[in-house]
Amino acid sequence: MSVTDDRGDLIELIHRLYACTDDGRFDDLRSVFSEGVKAGAPGGGVVEGQDRLITTLSAAHSTGQRSQHLVHNVLVDVDGDQAGVRADVIAIHCDSDKPEGRIAPEPGLTVSLRLRYEAIRSSEGWRVSRIDGDLLWASNTQPQAVPAS
């Protein structure tokens, strides 16, 4: 396989990660993550292992909500059977219900992330083995709770 093919496969792998998440196909993430995947958790800490990461992602994306991840500025660096990928991701979350008088649900939370992935080539193809990143900005249009007086 050529480096060009590897780059295309790795870009597709990152896009598949978010397509599975947005579609609620969390079991399909087994074709994206390595068994020993490690991911930086929001607020600190690390989530380790394929099952644990899939459970964490599933819990963060409830069935009553929609999400859309826009992936751009993807850069890939292949080094044999290992690779590094950098991508900017805008994640938009909203309730599934359409407000009366509107054509579609309105975004509640939008965040912009700069993410770095490590990937390894396995017998089944490329798999994400590590995810880290930075939150660049957030916009929350959901009503805030009024503090009790």
Image (cartoon, rainbow, N blue to C red):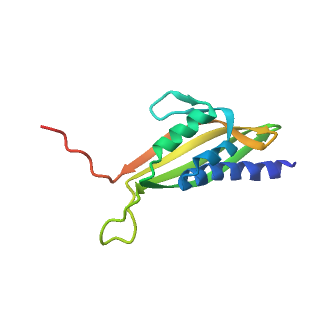
In percent of the image, x 34 and y 70: which residue is there?
Answer: 102
Task: State the residue in front, 3 or 129.
Answer: 129
Q: Position of residue 53 (x, y in %)?
A: 57, 36
In percent of the image, x 44 and y 32: which residue is there?
Answer: 43
Q: Position of residue 143 (x, y in %)?
A: 27, 51
Q: Position of residue 97 (x, y in %)?
A: 37, 61
Q: How many marks?
A: 0
In percent of the image, x 78 and y 39: which residue is there?
Answer: 121
Q: Is residue 145 left or right of residue 91?
A: left
Q: Position of residue 31 (x, y in %)?
A: 69, 45
| Quadrant in which residue 114 is drawn | top right
Q: Is residue 24 left or right of residue 105?
A: right
Task: State the residue in front, 104 or 40.
Answer: 104
Specify the farthest residue to the right. 1
Q: Is residue 124 left or right of residue 60?
A: right
In percent of the image, x 62 and y 39: which residue is there?
Answer: 116
Q: Is residue 98 left or right of residue 146?
A: right
Specify the farthest residue to the top. 45
Above or below for 103 versus 48 = below
